[in-house]
């Protein structure tokens, strides 16, 4: 028998099998399928994500920049880490050959014509998320809103359904028109969402004490882009959020409403994955914009 085939030599019995922890905080005890979906959404090298949020139409209709998703958004898909959209847009517009992970909006109800937006319900079945090969689902949670309890129960029902099939849930801190946006509120909202089972949380950035929001949340936080800002301001907000503990961004209007969306998403990705400073990222944006 050849020397290389000696019993035991190929098994390296003296080297224990490594059991590394998962790269996302709070996720090490999740099932393999859920970890795999999270590892598609979040870059394992940086531990972060640039999600492109285009779900606005579920209550706003054809938002500026989203009138023709086939023309404005499909060309951007290769540049993001994950797309956050509705199942209607996924089926009707997004090419099935796309290899990017899809996170699906799973809640809905009132439109912008209504004053009270917290009256939401679960708007899709988890079986459909499985059929669509979703990497995750997202749902609004209105902590402090008129329908707070229902929105919390909507999320926990979705979490239970996700655990059965290995699909993670992104809980989204929804703020009403009159609610204060400060670190105290977001610490409360993010912690409740995580405590009740969401695998990651989407929330807004606040300039004061945002690091206390990320530190007190036991699962990853993804920063919401919010309203359209000047490019440098949006890049600065993303940079500050990342430096203060966010595991990525879920930006929409600050990308697809930009004069140069491809250049903007590249600049955001440099901030998120490479820790590029805002002014350097703006230089990158302008350079890419000049190249067309």
Image: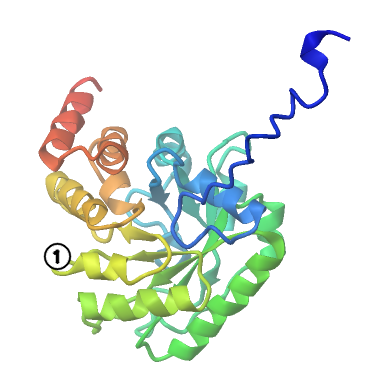
- What percent of the width, then of the height, locates residue 260? 25, 35
Is residue 209 or residue 19 the one in the foreground?
19
Left or right for 15, reference 102 = right
Q: Residue at x 43, y 37 (%)?
A: 71
Residue 234 drawn above or below residue 275:
below
- What percent of the width, then of the height, locates residue 178? 23, 84
Is residue 112 or residue 34 the one in the foreground?
34
Q: Which residue is mark 1?
A: 207
Q: Residue at x 32, y 34 (%)?
A: 262
Residue 88 drawn above or below residue 106:
above
Q: Split into 4 quadrants, where in the image is the C terminus?
A: top left
Classify residue 93 by image quadrant: top right
Q: Is residue 181 visible?
A: no
From this viewpoint, which residue is outermost toward the top? 2
- What percent of the width, then of the height, locates residue 109? 50, 77
Density class for disc 1 (Cα within 10 Å; few <14, some 14-19, many ≥20) is few
**Disc 1 element:** loop
Classify residue 177 by image quadrant: bottom left
- What percent of the width, then of the height, locates residue 168? 57, 61
């Amino acid at each position: 028998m050849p020397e290389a085939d000696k019993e035991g030599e190929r098994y390296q019995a003296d080297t224990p099998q490594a059991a590394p922890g998962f790269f996302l905080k709070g996720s090490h005890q999740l099932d393999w399928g859920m970890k795999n979906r999270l590892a598609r959404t979040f870059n394992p090298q940086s531990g972060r994500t640039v999600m492109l949020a285009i779900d606005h139409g579920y209550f706003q209709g054809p938002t500026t920049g989203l009138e023709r998703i086939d023309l404005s958004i499909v060309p951007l898909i290769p540049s993001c880490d994950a797309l956050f959209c509705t199942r209607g847009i996924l089926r009707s517009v997004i090419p099935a050959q796309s290899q990017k992970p899809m996170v699906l909006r799973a809640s809905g109800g009132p439109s912008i014509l209504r004053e009270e937006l917290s009256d939401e319900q679960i708007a899709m079945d988890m079986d459909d998320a499985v059929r669509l090969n979703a990497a995750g689902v997202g749902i609004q949670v209105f902590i402090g809103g008129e329908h707070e309890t229902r929105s919390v129960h909507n999320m926990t029902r979705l979490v239970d359904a996700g655990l059965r099939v290995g699909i993670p849930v992104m809980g989204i801190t929804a703020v009403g028109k009159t609610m204060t946006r400060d670190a105290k509120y977001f610490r409360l909202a993010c912690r409740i969402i995580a405590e009740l089972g969401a695998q990651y949380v989407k929330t807004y950035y606040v300039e004061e004490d945002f690091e206390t929001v990320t530190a007190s949340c036991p699962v990853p936080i993804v920063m919401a882009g919010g309203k359209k800002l000047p490019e440098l301001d949006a890049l600065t907000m993303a940079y500050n959020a990342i430096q203060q503990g966010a595991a990525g961004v879920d930006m929409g209007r600050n990308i697809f409403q930009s004069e140069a969306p491809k250049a903007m998403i590249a600049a955001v990705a440099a901030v998120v994955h490479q820790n590029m400073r805002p002014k350097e990222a703006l230089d990158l944006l302008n350079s890419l914009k000049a190249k067309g």
